[in-house]
Image (tube, rainbow, N blue to C red):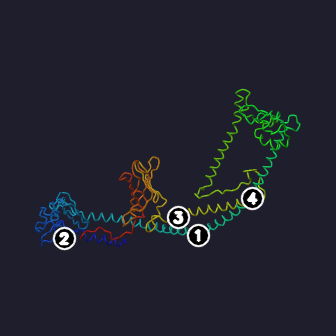
Amino acid sequence: MICKYLFLTFILHIDLYDASQMVQVDRPRGVSLTKKVLYDPAKEFTCFDGSQTIQFQFVNDDYCDCNDGSDEPGTSACPNGSFHCTNAGYRPQNIPSSRVNDGICDCCDGTDEWKTPTACANTCMELRRAALEENKKKMEESSKGFALRQEYAKTGQAKKLERQEKVKELQQELAQIQLLEDTLKTEKEAIEIQETAAIDEHKRIAEEKQQKIAHEENLRKGAEAFSEMDVDKDGSLTIPELLSHPELDPDTSDGIFTEEEALTILQAGSVDMAVFMDTVWGAINETFRTNIPPPMEEQEAPAEDQIQDGSEQEREADRELLEEPEEEDQDQDEEDEDSDEEYDDEHEYDEDGEYHEPPVLRKETDTSNSGEPYDEITQNLVNQANEARSKFQEAQTKKKNLENEVESLNKALELDFGPDEGYQALQFQCFELLTMEYKYKLCPYDKATQSPKNGGSETVLGRWGSWSGPPENIYAKMMYENGITCWNGPARSTEVVIRCGMEHKLLSVDEPSRCAYKYEFATPCACTQVDPNALPRDEL
């Protein structure tokens, strides 16, 4: 490739030292080779727009005959005419005919100033040599960039294959974990049926025991109440004895406990212990209050409605004593809530972002009723159920993490990293450009952002949308859409123009219209294979 380039350069230096003298083509001034056939001196000339036909001698006579100016290609007579610069040895050029003989050298061969041939030097060969040097520089840069692109493409293709294989592997693992989950679910549900039955039986027994204790306690309190109200200890409770307890008055509105009301309660003039327990105690056990003070060590703080004596300071102290347990309970509730929140935060996702659902396990003791420990058989079933639930939820967690990983890999596989996967080298990277006021950032396949140079919140100028280049090369541009909405305007968007470069670099940022940004980004991923024959050519 280098030899071929040197050979072509050598030929150009030898043969094109003065291309204007090598080729002489008979044609009217200002006419290109492609249009020479339209200017035949042996025929009349017809205007390109067909407006009229004139004698050929009127072509380039410095008078505009045709409306389209085609009869004056070599003069400035027609304001809409076009003059062709041959520029032998360099690139041909078309200029407006108004520039012909205006004293300014527009053509490198000086043919546009034909009235003063010595006014313009022929600089076409110098321009050609400069173009060759620039072209050589671009070819070298493009060649090195293309070599880097091939490396990126090789890595990208390997990464794509690796992801595809990983998805297959994870899908097989998912199928296995699904079978395991189904098995563990069946085992869990089976042992939970036994566990529920055992716990229900435990609760039934505990409730019966509590009911028995409550019944015995009720009988004890009833006997004590009968004994207290049976003042004469004759084994019979009379109406006068019942009246000694005014809290038993069924009609508290008048404040008088009458014999008729006492008779209604006793249903007789007097009752013995057996009748009292069967017919009377159930009606008064909620309202009965003993007049016998408890022992000193068992006395509790008096209720607020019973505090009638003492100074205001003592009553206030008693009130505070009564209110303290409520505050303690409230503090305890808040601690419990904080504990619950810490538990939730701790068990949802770990530091690697993997999901972990805490297993719902039975407590070792049944505190909903008696608080007594389970018997050995019930406890064994609870332990087995706890273990089954734990294994099942571990399988669920593993399955969910696998599904998340597969989803992430599939999203990466759906991204368009170019025809050779080379643009995958840009993923998970960000590139910055500092201006006088802002720091701009481009994170390919993610987002484009803007933030104040000296610190401040970041504004999203668009999120990855798609490749948006022309049909012949869609990878020439990226489009980032649906950024932060402008004040009273549209959502921000960013177009990224991609060009070949030796390194990944954000070159420039512009805002050609409100809320629409334009980035220029260089990357070896955009470099193509160099054509060594891509040299400047003239029309000769």
Nearer-the-camera pick, 501 or 201: 201
Q: Quadrant of the N terminus?
A: bottom left
Circles 4 and 3: CB atoms closer than 8 Å: no
Judging depth in this view, the residue of 89 and 201 nearest the camera is 201
Q: From the image, state whether disc 4 or disc 1 is nearer to you.
A: 4
Q: Which residue is mark 1?
A: 172
Badge 1 density bin: few <14, some 14–19, many ≥20, Cα 10 Å:
few
Indicate left or right for 82 with 168 as reference.
left
N-terminal of the pair, mark 4 or mark 3, is 4
Q: For numbered disc 4, what is the local secondary structure?
A: helix
Residue beneath disc 2:
36
**CA–CA distance in space, label 1 to label 2:** 73 Å
Return the disc, 3 or 1, that comes first in the chain's sequence: 1
Q: Which residue is mark 3?
A: 409
**Above or below: residue 115 compared with residue 305:** below
- The residue lying at 39 percent from left, 50 percent from top is 489
Are circles 3 and 1 on residues that touch, CB within 8 Å? Answer: no
Q: Dots 3 and 2: beta carbons under 8 Å?
A: no
Left or right, 356 with respect to 144, comes to right
Residue 496 at what x, y percent from top left? 40, 58
Q: Position of residue 69 (x, y in %)?
A: 17, 63
